[in-house]
Image (cartoon, rainbow, N blue to C red):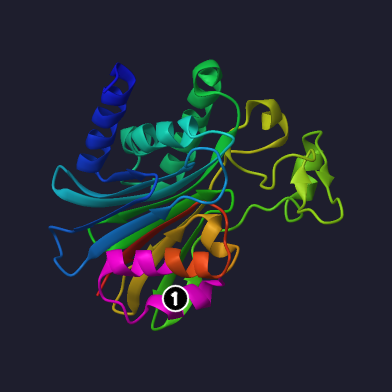
Amino acid sequence: MTGKEVLHKMKETVKEKVGLGSSADSGKGKSKMSKQITHGFHLLKGKALHEMEDYVVAKFKEVDDNELGLFAIFDGHLTHEIPDYLCSHLFDNILKEPNFWQEPEKAIKKAYYITDTKILDKATDLGKGGSTAVTAILINCQKLVVANVGDSRAVICKSGVAKPLSVDHEPNMEKDEVESRGGFVSNFPGDVPRVDGQLAVTRAFGDKSLKMHLSSEPYVTMEVVDDDAEFLILASDGLWKVMSNQEAVDSVKGIKDAKSAAKRLAEEAVARKSSDDISVVVVRFQ
C-alpha cells in the first residue's frame, strides 16, 4: 500500500469507530439508556463519475450524565472534503456552545455559522463547492432537536403518519431572500431553479463564490419522543427526489431492524431510478 492508501485506511477505521460512514457503507448501533432505541445507516454511490459526496454520522455519545444520539447526513456538491470536514467538526462545535442544554436552538444556529465561517476560511484546502446538511440530536431518548440547510431531509413517523422535521431550501421558495442579497434565481426550461444559475439550494455550507447570495442559517425544530413516535428517517435528496415522505415511511414501517430499513430505502430509491448518491439513517424508537 502507498502512504496515501495507508492514510485513507486509517481515516476510514477512525470513522468506523465513531459511527461515521462514507462511500458504499452500512452500520448500526443502539442506545445504552434505552435498549429499544436503535439506529442504522446505509449509503449507495450514485452514477456520477466523481467520488462519493455523501457522508453520514450515526452514534450515541455520553456527555456527563446525559446521553446524546448524534445523527446527520452531509451531501456535498462539487466536493467530498467539506462534508468530510462537517463529519469531524459540526457536532463538536454544537456541543461546545455553553448554552446548548438551555437553548439548543440558538446554540445550533451559532455553531452552524461558526462552522461555515471556518469552512470558508479553509477554502484553499477544502476546495470549491459546498454541502447541505441535516442533523438530529436525540437528548436522553426524550427530545429531538433537528436542523437543516439545503435539501437533505428529516421525517419522523408518528402513529404511522409522516411528519417533516426539516424544510427544503429551494430557490423558488426563498427567491426574495436571494434577491435581497444581490443574487438571482434562474428558471431555465428543462432545469431546476438555481441561485445565480448554479446552485439548486439557497442554504448550504461552503460555496464561497456564491456565499454573498446564500445562507448557512439552519431551520431548527424540536420534537418530543412520545409513545406515538415510531422512527426517524434522515436522508439526502437522492432518496427524496423519487419518494414522498409518506411513501418512505410506509415502505419501512414493518421493518424492525433499523439498518435493514435504511438499506431498504436506499435500494428502493435506486429501483425508482434515482441516479444520485443516496444516504439514509433510520432511528427506531420502538
Residue 24, horizontal then vertical, whole percent: 38, 49
29 vs 107, left or right, is left
Residue 275, horizontal then vertical, whole percent: 57, 56
**Is residue 257 magenta-colored?**
yes
210 vs 93, left or right, is right
At horizontal 29% and vertical 64% (from top left) the residue drawn is 259
At horizontal 53% and vertical 54% (from top left) the residue drawn is 152
264 vs 112, left or right, is left
Q: Is residue 256 above or below residue 103?
A: below
Question: In which quarter of the view is residue 26 placed?
Answer: bottom left
At horizontal 79% and vertical 40% (from top left) the residue drawn is 197
Query: How many C-alpha atoms fall within 10 Å of the one at disc 1: few (<14), some, or many (≥20)?
Result: many
Residue ID for mark 1: 249
98 vs 151, left or right, is left
Q: Is residue 199 above or below residue 42?
A: above
State the residue in front, 277 or 82. Answer: 277
Question: In which quarter of the view is residue 261 placed?
Answer: bottom left
- Quadrant placement of the C terminus: bottom left
Mark 1 is on which residue type? Val
Question: In which quarter of the view is residue 244 placed?
Answer: bottom right
Q: Main secondary structure of the magenta part?
A: helix
At horizontal 18% and vertical 59% (from top left) the residue drawn is 31
- Quadrant placement of the N terminus: top left
Residue 165, horizontal then vertical, whole percent: 49, 63
| Residue 35 in view (yes/no) | yes
Residue 234, horizontal then vertical, whole percent: 43, 59
Find the magenta span and give its range. 243-265
